[in-house]
Amino acid sequence: MTKTINLNADMGEGWGAYSIGDDDGILKIIKSASIACGFHGGDPVTMRHVVQRAKEEGVSIGAHPGFNDLWGFGRRRIDMRADDLECMIAYQIGALQAMANYVGEKVTHLKPHGALNNIAAEQPEIAMAIGRAIKAVDPDIIYVALSGSEMEKAGRKLNLKVAREGFCDRQYDDDGNLTSRKIPGSVIKDPAVVVKQVVHMVLNGEIISRNGKPVKHQVDTLCVHADEPTTITTAQAARKGLEGAGVKIVPLTEMQFE
Amino acid sequence: MTKTINLNADMGEGWGAYSIGDDDGILKIIKSASIACGFHGGDPVTMRHVVQRAKEEGVSIGAHPGFNDLWGFGRRRIDMRADDLECMIAYQIGALQAMANYVGEKVTHLKPHGALNNIAAEQPEIAMAIGRAIKAVDPDIIYVALSGSEMEKAGRKLNLKVAREGFCDRQYDDDGNLTSRKIPGSVIKDPAVVVKQVVHMVLNGEIISRNGKPVKHQVDTLCVHADEPTTITTAQAARKGLEGAGVKIVPLTEMQFE
Amino acid sequence: MTKTINLNADMGEGWGAYSIGDDDGILKIIKSASIACGFHGGDPVTMRHVVQRAKEEGVSIGAHPGFNDLWGFGRRRIDMRADDLECMIAYQIGALQAMANYVGEKVTHLKPHGALNNIAAEQPEIAMAIGRAIKAVDPDIIYVALSGSEMEKAGRKLNLKVAREGFCDRQYDDDGNLTSRKIPGSVIKDPAVVVKQVVHMVLNGEIISRNGKPVKHQVDTLCVHADEPTTITTAQAARKGLEGAGVKIVPLTEMQFE
Amino acid sequence: MTKTINLNADMGEGWGAYSIGDDDGILKIIKSASIACGFHGGDPVTMRHVVQRAKEEGVSIGAHPGFNDLWGFGRRRIDMRADDLECMIAYQIGALQAMANYVGEKVTHLKPHGALNNIAAEQPEIAMAIGRAIKAVDPDIIYVALSGSEMEKAGRKLNLKVAREGFCDRQYDDDGNLTSRKIPGSVIKDPAVVVKQVVHMVLNGEIISRNGKPVKHQVDTLCVHADEPTTITTAQAARKGLEGAGVKIVPLTEMQFE
């Protein structure tokens, strides 16, 4: 049986006159787009444009909601009540659904952005609030969750489809968590090393930690970045490496979830 | 055959710690709520709350999108490109649809707010942009349009359902337009006069201008306000007066449109 | 020698069409106003208006900066880098100084708002960031600091004038901290009890904790609230009680600081 | 006597994670910087950074206030009351003054941004509102005004110092107004033509219209752009051309105003 995997990336994070990231470049590599929804980035015009481009490239459409903090680009934690946060997520999903209607598509997954993703991975009540928003707005939306995190648990508890996420270009610790960015070497820049990691992760369901220890790590989707020219190169290498190893890259909507 | 009419009001226009208008008071009087969608007012938490309350009161749910100008409460004209404005409207509709999903309801009408309503009444390209947003997001949404305005024309051109709107507590000029607020007496404060105007408007399809001239004026919905205690009183009088004249007050979703 | 004390309150926290608090009522009671600066509340028009009113009432003008979170009314902690936070404070001070220029006055004190005040009381690096902003923009600005907090320490370290703040209508624990609002009775609503507390605090430099224990607590300014009719009543009682005990209520600018 | 002229440019228009324009490149060419103040662009951190860089390069600091419309980058007209607009300008000046204090400098000029500049050039009441804000906050601030516009008139009426502005890379009509951008050739891209225009403008106090007609056009400052690599090239050519013609490029603070 052919192994399948999804590649996803964040996009549509510009704002009016400001652009950020290489959306067009990354759309050629990935199969699922996590599109900013107007709070940490992504004004309505950008949203509609990216939805259109994703459709043209055969890339499935997901929501990438963030904190209401354009200045901080959604990277600063805001201490919100879980109920308020849930409303904030629901709002952003709905806004993107409206844009997806323009091209006859649906919002099929959700991946939180930045600081929101970080706290949702750690805090059960935040992970559940996001899950409840999905459930209320459209229970068919796939919850993209850091593999092994509170998000994965919350998604399963709520009977949502959960896509476990791994990273192409990040080292892992022995406990399966991402190595902190503060530690030198935590971001992998050598495409050959990236390829080795992703192929091993997808074929064997484990990662090799930075100390050389094998750790179980099931993934349904791999996150790639488009922030700089080098990340595009890395992403391309990951895709080619996976295809060379006989892995098929598909949209999240074509994955089978447990 | 029993005459029917709809009563609508704007609501959910608070923002976080700020509240404005008497939403609970007005929900007892109207049958359709035009709910702010987060741009000129109405944060996500308020939106979800008002949607819930509307459902409880048997009031149908509509979008009340406005300019992205919380400081100006959507009352200042912003010179936007029609395409950008269209995206801005679609975004707001979608956000409210997400909230409506929480209570198993749909967004069934749309009425622009403040300055947006004013320019849409006058400028065909803006009226069309709003109509296109409705059509793209959900073509069953009823376009609430000042009777005789460019909005009415745009709605018909796009084959949308159009609810022609009249005003309970505003005088009209001989040409059927609202008398400017700058002219003394343009806002009717005497409940008895309000009742006389609305009953005549609904039963006869005409208004009597401030100069005493009868002017054809077909309406499907009447706008009431909840800004001050006196407007609640006026709204109550309008409702009782209409019911006393044998007119049935129904949600917009139960109206027959031409 | 006559004892002096300052009474301060937060104000100007409305936003465009939204108003909140009874600014005019509270201006008759206090001697120093902490005016919102446009981030958690307080648009430019409101700021200019309140500055004018404060001048008319002989009330000194202070900055009341907050997090950039109008939706949360500055009550949610945002995890900002200290340097970024410092810039955010400096910006808000400057904006209010511009308004003060309209009436020939200066911004003479600063009191952080809501969640910003809470974290500044606890976290030395935040308390110092606020102090550095004061020092850079105008080192004569008085730093209003919860008595005994990290803010007081930061202010002294930076050689700023520090006004130690106490509360009229809040109970204290045995360690001199405010009793949590979650504990019943923590907010004092009986004007007689308020009067007893403030007179004792000002004349004796100590508070009696809710367990009856005397705790040293030096204060230069007492915070009053104007959120509800009852808080205005409490504030009035505090003022009258202090004056009845021979204490003179003066602007912060007339206080002597250690 | 040596002729002097100022070169100015807009800068600091980024926002958080978003950057725009080549501030460092343009700072080497100009002598006065018009710095965004947080409304159409320019967050507090960016503001402080640019103020520091301007100081290092010997470039004088000016305010570049805009409409409260980050999404539209201040390029959309907002129909504000003149009094509200005045407060909005004062607020922005004050915010930048706070940042200038960090480096021991003053805000010495003001130039409105985008749509605000356009309407101020045409509408006397807007031009006066901006002038009144300057006068209230710091009457020594130089009002940079399109030569011959309502802004120039307002500045003179209010006894403000007025710096008349011309453009390096724009064609002019016979009446002295800028040729519309819609007309081919209105933006001059050939550095040699730019040099010819600016040298003639500065030495002779006139421009040659696109029809070859000489038109009186006194300027104190010339605006250069840094939006694209080509505009930097044009700006450099203008500077070298002027210096080659014996014109001295100085900060606005060293110009003599009528």
Image: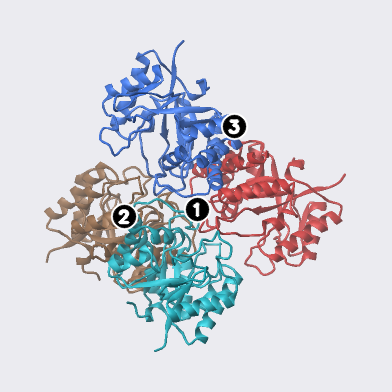
Chain colours: A brown, B cyan, C red, D blue
How crowded pointer 2 is (Cα within 10 Å; few <14, some 14-19, many 20+) is rated as some
Residue C180: quadrant of the picture: bottom right
The amino acid type, in three-letter code, at marker 1 is Ile
The amino acid type, in three-letter code, at marker 2 is Asp
Q: Residue furthest top?
A: D1
Q: What residue is shown with label 1?
A: C78
**Residue C253 image offset from top left, x and y in percent:** 73, 41
Q: Residue at coordinates 73% horizontally, 64% vertically from top-left? A: C210
Residue A205: quadrant of the picture: bottom left
Looking at this view, is D34 or D100 the one in front?
A: D34
- Position of residue B80 relative to residue B55, above or below, is above
| Figure label count | 3
Q: Which mark is residue B83?
A: 2
**Circle 1 sits in a helix, a strand or a loop, which is it?**
loop
**Residue C50 image offset from top left, x and y in percent:** 65, 50
Q: CA distance from mark 1 to mark 2?
A: 35 Å
Q: What residue is shown with label 3?
A: D139
Looking at this view, is D162 or B182 the one in front?
A: B182
Q: Which mark is residue B222?
A: none
**Circle 2 sits in a helix, a strand or a loop, which is it?**
helix
Q: CA distance from mark 3 to mark 2?
A: 42 Å
**Circle 3 sits in a helix, a strand or a loop, which is it?**
loop
Residue C29: quadrant of the picture: bottom right
Asked if marks 3 and 2 touch (Cβ < 8 Å), the reply is: no
Q: CA distance from mark 1 to mark 3?
A: 37 Å
Answer yes or no: are tags 3 and 2 on the same subunit.
no
The amino acid type, in three-letter code, at marker 3 is Pro
The N terminus of chain C - image quarter: top right
Answer yes or no: are tags 1 and 3 on the same subunit.
no
